[in-house]
Amino acid sequence: MRPASLHDTLSHNRQLGRKSLAVLLDPDNIDEPGCQRLLELGQQHRIDYFFVGGSLVLSSHQAALIRFIKSRTHVPVLLFPSHSLHLDPQADGILLLSLISGRNPEFLIGQHVIAAPRLRESGLQILPTGYMLVDSGRQTTASYVSGTTPLPHDKPAIAACTAMAGEQLGLRLIYLDGGSGALHPVSPAMIRAVRQAVDLPIIVGGGLNSAEKARAALQAGADIIVVGNHIEQNPEFLAEVAAVITDHELARI
């Protein structure tokens, strides 16, 4: 059974200062035993959302992965698509990503036009999301596939204005992403600048491979932190990053 409104929950949590943890699963990189291990750990440690998708999704495993997750947990599953082909009505919702950090029309509106009829029929809850790639010290698959230049890592003002424009266009979430395999995460200074510029829930991912980096992102203003590659390689990291969320919640009391 799908939540009444994913967007309302995200906005409500944002207003209350509640933080969330999302685990990003790439269907090309995780198998059933690995997913089962994560789900078992998720019963012990907090996971608020599963994001499913990636820059390529070369395999046909996405549908099976979503079905596997949905059969074993009530944690909401959100699609993290890079192409109109990556839609699946089994999920609870979709982060409808508009790549506002780039100037490639295919990822600003082109793929969205192709997907629109299927999205309307899918019943998925749609979360229009301003997706902002940030330079992480190396070229990522996302920047290569999208043919776009990431935002400069040390230019928080550019990120703030980009997010502000996304909010003014009616987007409802902002996603700051260093990309898969990021050498370093989005800087706290950039997160802070975006937090001051918009009144939207902010998702931050890429390069959050330590408790210290996760904590810094939350303290700078991230509402949802995303872990992906590192947790696929080291599932026990879930305990560390979940503890960071819990500690942040306790500090608010």
Image (cartoon, rainbow, N blue to C red):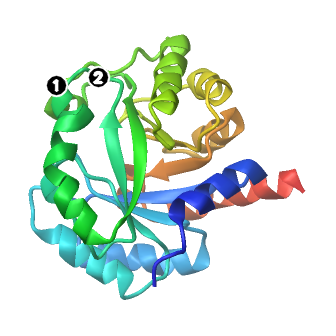
> Is 117 in front, or is 245?
117
Q: Secondary structure at mark 1?
A: loop
Q: Name above or below for residue 165 compared with residue 91.
A: above
Residue 217 is drawn in which quadrant?
A: top right
Q: Where is residue 35 shown, x and y percent of the image?
A: 34, 74
* Mark nearer the viewer, 1 or 2: 2
* Residue shown at 20% from the left, 73% from the top: 63
The numbered dot on residue 102 is 2
- Is disc 2 surrounded by few (<14), some (14 to 19) or many (20+) residues within 10 Å? many
Q: Where is residue 26 shown, x and y percent of the image?
A: 27, 58
Q: Which residue is mark 1?
A: 147
Residue 131 is drawn in which quadrant?
A: top left
Q: Where is residue 118 shown, x and y percent of the image?
A: 18, 62
Q: Secondary structure at mark 2?
A: loop
First of labels 1, 2 by sequence position: 2
Task: Answer yes or no: is residue 19 visible.
Answer: no
* Residue shown at 54% from the left, 74% from the top: 4
Going by the image, does 241 lie left or right of 55?
Answer: right
Q: Where is residue 188 shown, x and y percent of the image?
A: 61, 27
Distance, label 1 to label 2, CA atoms, is: 8 Å
Give the residue type that dot 1 points to.
Gly
Q: Name above or below for residue 83 compared with residue 217.
A: below
Give the residue type that dot 2 points to.
Gly
Tell me whether circle 1 and circle 2 mark residues in contact (CB < 8 Å): yes
Please give the count of numbered marks on the rendered protein: 2
The numbered dot on residue 29 is none
* Residue shown at 46% from the left, 52% from the top: 227
* Residue shown at 35% from the left, 24% from the top: 101
Q: Name above or below for residue 107 compared with residue 2.
A: above
| Quarter of the rendering occupied by the N terminus | bottom left
